[in-house]
Amino acid sequence: MIHGDTGHRRAVLSVLQEYRRHLTADEVYEEVRKSLPRISKGTVYRNLRILRERGDIVALELGGALTRFEARQEPHYHFVCEICGTVFDLDEPVGQDLNTRVEKKTGFRVSYHHLEFRGRCSGCESTQTTH
Ligand SMILES: [Zn+2]
Ligand SMILES: [Zn+2]
């Protein structure tokens, strides 16, 4: 059913857009299931792959073992909490001059760079200090 598959894809994309979070494939599946209880895991995974190929979402290979997905937006850096594993978007300008500098030094062509900060988020930090 063409109609059904389009609906599934839209549901998968809207989960990622709505929450603005960085979800693993399993987490996306759990969220989509709330509105489409009968959707299968295979369908969610397939639509994630299609959305990724179309450039609607981005797959993040962060320090953890699991790939996380987010709806495409402006380039941005990430902060990963080492305690709870939450991924945060950082409101920090992406340094394009870094690409230029590396290109000049190496003669390589840079497509993009990714920066990942790691540490303790404010929630985990306050739990740690009160104990
Ligand atoms: Zn945390
Ligand atoms: Zn992000």
Image (tube, grey):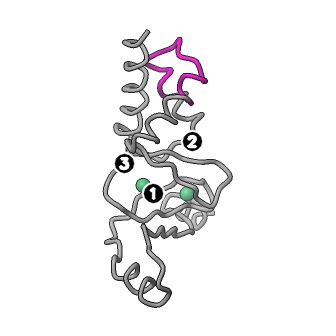
Residue behind label 1 places its C-beta within 8 angstroms of ligand 2: yes
Q: Are marks 2 and 3 in contact (CB under 8 Å)?
A: no
The answer to whether residue 122 is left or right of residue 17 is right
Instruction: State the image coordinates of residue 113 (x, y, percent, origin top left).
Output: 46, 70
Q: Residue furthest right?
A: 65
* Chain-order first, disc 2 or disc 1: 2
Quarter of the rendering occupied by the N terminus: top left
Q: Nearer the viewer, mark 2 or mark 1?
A: 2
- The correct choice, above or below, for 118 with respect to 74 in the image is below
Classify the position of ligand 2 by quadrant: top left, top right, bottom left or bottom right: bottom left
- The correct choice, above or below, for 59 with respect to 107 in the image is above
Q: Secondary structure at mark 3?
A: loop
Residue shown at 40% from the left, 87% from the top: 101
The verdict on residue 99 being magenta is no
What distance separates the C-alpha of mark 2 from that of mark 3? Answer: 15 Å
Residue denoted by label 3: 72
Amino acid type shown at disc 2:
Thr
- The dominant secondary structure in magenta is helix
Q: Which mark is residue 24?
A: 2
Q: Secondary structure at mark 1?
A: strand
Q: Nearer the viewer, mark 3 or mark 1?
A: 3
* Chain-order first, disc 2 or disc 3: 2
Instruction: State the image coordinates of residue 87 (x, y, percent, origin top left).
Output: 50, 55
Q: Secondary structure at mark 2?
A: strand
* Quadrant hosting residue 14: top left
